[in-house]
Amino acid sequence: MSTFTAINLVARPDGGPVGPHWFEVVQKERPTVGAGQFLVKQTHMSLDPAMFGWMSPDTESYIPPVALGEVMRSSGIGEIIESNHEGFNVGDRVMGLLGWQELILSDGQGLNKVEAPLPDEAILSVFALPGLTATQGLYSIGKPKAGETIVVSGAAGSVGSIVGQLAKADGLTVVGVVGTDEKANWIVNELGFDGAINYKTDNLEQKLAELTPNGIDIYFENTGGPIQQHVFERMNTHGRIAVCGMIADYPKPVPTPGPNWIPMIKKRLTVQGFAMPDHFGEVPALLAKLTPYVMQGKIKHRTHVLNGLESAMTGLNLFFTGENKGKLIVKL
């Protein structure tokens, strides 16, 4: 191809649904591959809740926002189709921040070779950002111990589902918070969670008390929303809360007020937010921790695949509606 398609961010979130008016589809000339460079043809692109922060104008976040007029940021996986780099060969698969575009010219910085003999969708679902995030948050902040109880919000999502399965494999009682009965059935009957709460239909206080009779030692927070206060009130002394995401508040101009801090003093709770750009140097160690669970068959996943680069422009709305089932991926 002499040209390729890319999608630039041209407007900031306006409080409404994500749509094409935020973006511009452009055609670019195929780049020339120079010395020490290679060209990647992206095959699959990841859609993640973190993108809402990347599109906002907030300059005080953990990573600078995407500049207007620049290619929208995203992680992805692709195959090298041309190379003048001695460390990367034609046919190698690589993953990293490839962006919303079909072709990527790289010198290798920030990209990692994919060695695992798994399909692209499985790599993005488990070994890319979701698995790394789950492993970092659970073990560095949650510090799980066999016999403890963990509650995971967004438990049927790409991160939450891995957190729950890792914790279950380590001997914890695992309760997941989801938004549909179908997702509740999936995490319990397929993934092995001990219980599930549908935050849209269940009596949250009552259901949580039933499923966590010994209180809660770890809370892995992906969503915010009405379940948060109920979980906070049931935290055990020296409990740990890993704050990964707050998607319930992302579209709100004013976030929902959080819990009072007095119980944090009484129970000596640890509450820590985290973001993966702080830990990219730890990726090899995180993969070494995660890989045995995957190879032993203890981690299952499912994907929700959208077709075509331009489907990303509206596909992000699935995070707000809860209609996505599994890791949200765009197949190019």
Image (cartoon, helix red, strand yellow):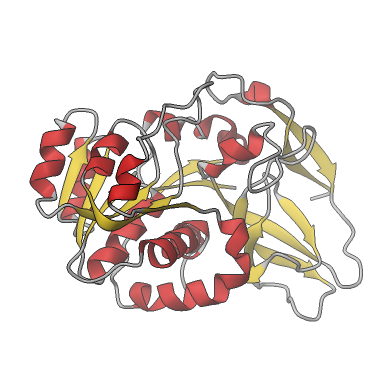
Left or right relative to 127: residue 87: right
* Whole-percent x, y for residue 36 in the image: 87, 73
Left or right relative to 173: residue 94: right
Left or right relative to 256: residue 91: right
Identify which residue is drawn at 80% across, 33% down: 69
Q: Nearer the viewer, residue 209 or 310?
A: 209
Q: Nearer the viewer, residue 20 or 298?
A: 298
* Whole-percent x, y for residue 165 in the image: 28, 62
Residue 300 lies, with reference to residue 227, above or below; the image says: below
Left or right relative to 188: residue 167: right
Identify which residue is drawn at 24% across, 41% down: 233
Identify which residue is drawn at 25% across, 72% down: 170
Q: Nearer the viewer, residue 91 or 282?
A: 282
**Would you say residue 156 is visible in this rendering?**
no
Residue 219 lies, with reference to residue 18, above or below; the image says: below
Residue 182 lies, with reference to residue 194, above or below; the image says: above
Q: Quadrant of residue 22?
A: top right
Identify which residue is drawn at 69% across, 57% down: 41
**Would you say residue 138 is visible in this rendering?**
yes
* Whole-percent x, y for residue 324 in the image: 38, 39
